[in-house]
Amino acid sequence: QWLLTERHVYEGHEITTQTKLLALEIISEFLHKGYSQASEADRLQLRDAVLKSARMTVVTNVMSPGETRILGKKLATVLEGIVVRDFPQRWQTFTTNIFGRLSAGGLWLDDPSMIQQQQVGVQICLECLKLIAEDCTDSDYNAKIN
């Protein structure tokens, strides 16, 4: 739920970025320690929540560019963690879910009037792809994945 709320305010202070980063860090730890025991339904629900959060980050303009960049990098890291565990067996629609147009459910924003947000989506996609490529070529890392 923390990921899917547009803004978090505590006692008048904006804590959206910090809250979402905490939620993503918790998810990241879960990917390393408990994801392999999760049911298919739980895996799908987690994947959908992270994708929705990434889409929200692309289309909303609530945070500063620096905060958006930090959150985008963490989202890319979590998405990469899911991809290396689920693609292609459990996540056959990965490429369309990530690299498709936002209007079709992906992260690529294809509205020329929203150039700043368009760059955020592209950065998340490319960072995710870079991390996947690094991990796919790391034999020590591949030996640890379940």
Image (cartoon, rainbow, N blue to C red):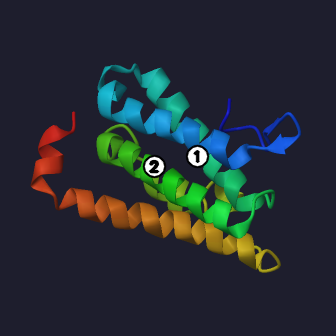
For disc 1, the neighbor class at 10 Å (few under 14, some 14 to 19, many from 20) is many
Dots 1, 2 in contact, CB < 8 A: yes
- Which of the image's four quarters has the C terminus? top left
Q: Using residue 100 as the reference point, say whether residue 8 is left or right of it.
A: right
Residue type, label 1: Leu
Q: From the top left corner, tell me how far across and down residue 135 is, in percent.
A: 24, 57
Q: Which residue is mark 1?
A: 51
Q: Which residue is mark 2?
A: 79
Q: Residue furthest right?
A: 12
Q: From the top left corner, tell me how far across and down residue 4 is, in percent.
A: 70, 38
Please give the name of the residue rendered at 58% of the width and 45% of the height, measured from the top-left corner. Answer: 21
Q: From the top left corner, tell me how far across and down residue 124 is, in percent.
A: 53, 63
For disc 2, the neighbor class at 10 Å (few under 14, some 14 to 19, many from 20) is many
Please give the name of the residue rendered at 45% of the width and 46% of the height, measured from the top-left corner. Answer: 78
**Viewer-nearest residue: 2 or 133:** 2
- Which of the image's four quarters has the N terminus? top right
N-terminal label among 1 and 2? 1
- Residue 107 shows which numbered tag? none
Residue 51 visible, this orientation: yes
Residue 34 against residue 26 in the figure, above or below: above
